Image: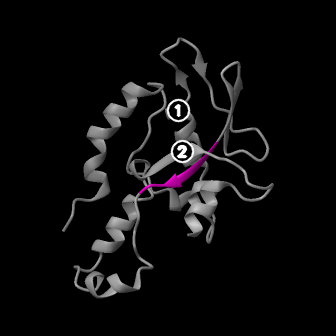
């Protein structure tokens, strides 16, 4: 049986504490599906994921300028505007689950019970998430969303 997510957290929590505000810890084992409304996408609706991204990616740049992300700009997941430019960012999971791949079902059925759930759960922790530039192709659809539909 794979280790529980809780067993992996201590090491990573220490690293994230050094990288971010020492007063606010990032729980690398937190499953963002748990604070997302039923049937909604954690990338859009998890307040914890948005807060963690904001903490991780708001930082001083090597140039000395500060890249501060805002979560209050309507229509943007995270937003930055300064002399550096305007950046709209979106979140997405970076761990493919292949759960909808019909040709893999026979392989998945051979796995011990619960192992696929464990693996899929990793994709909804901080280690499975990333932010990307959100290029809006029209007022409703970002390029990151189109990528996930293909």
Q: Are marks 2 and 1 in contact (CB under 8 Å)?
A: yes
- Residue 41 placement, left or right of 12: right
Residue at disc 2, secondary structure: strand
In the image, residue 92 above or below residue 26:
below
Q: Position of residue 22 (x, y in %)?
A: 44, 24
Q: Residues within 10 Å of mark 2 (few under 14, many from 20)?
A: many
Q: Which residues are magenta?
A: 89-94
Element on which disc 1 rests: helix
Q: Is residue 90 magenta?
A: yes
Q: Residue at x 26, y 39 (%)?
A: 11
Q: Nearer the viewer, residue 1 or 80?
A: 80
Name the mark on residue 10.
none
The residue indicated by pointer 2 is 131
Q: Residue at x 38, y 33 (%)?
A: 16
Q: Quadrant of the C terminus?
A: bottom right
Q: Identify the disc placed on residue 57.
A: 1
Disc with the residue nearer the chain's start (2 vs 1): 1
Point out residue 105 in the picture as x, y percentages from the top left corner: 34, 85
Mark 1: few/some/many CA within 10 Å (<14, 14-19, 20+): some
Q: Nearer the viewer, residue 53 or 83?
A: 83
9 and 45: which is toward the camera: 45
Question: Up-down: is 93 above or below 103?
Answer: above
Q: Position of residue 135 (x, y in %)?
A: 67, 47
């Amino acid at each position: 049986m794979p280790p529980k997510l809780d067993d992996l957290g201590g090491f990573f929590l220490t690293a994230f504490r050094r990288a971010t505000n020492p007063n606010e810890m990032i729980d690398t084992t937190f499953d963002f599906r748990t604070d997302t409304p039923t049937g909604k996408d954690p990338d859009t609706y998890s307040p914890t994921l948005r807060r963690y991204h904001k903490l991780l990616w708001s930082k001083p740049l090597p140039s000395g300028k500060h890249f501060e992300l805002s979560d209050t700009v309507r229509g943007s997941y995270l937003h930055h505007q300064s002399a550096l430019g305007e950046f709209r960012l979106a979140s997405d999971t970076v761990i493919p689950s292949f759960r909808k791949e019909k040709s893999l079902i026979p392989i998945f059925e051979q796995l011990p019970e619960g192992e696929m759930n464990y693996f899929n759960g990793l994709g909804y922790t901080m280690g499975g998430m990333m932010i990307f530039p959100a290029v809006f192709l029209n007022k409703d659809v970002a390029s990151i969303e189109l990528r996930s539909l293909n």
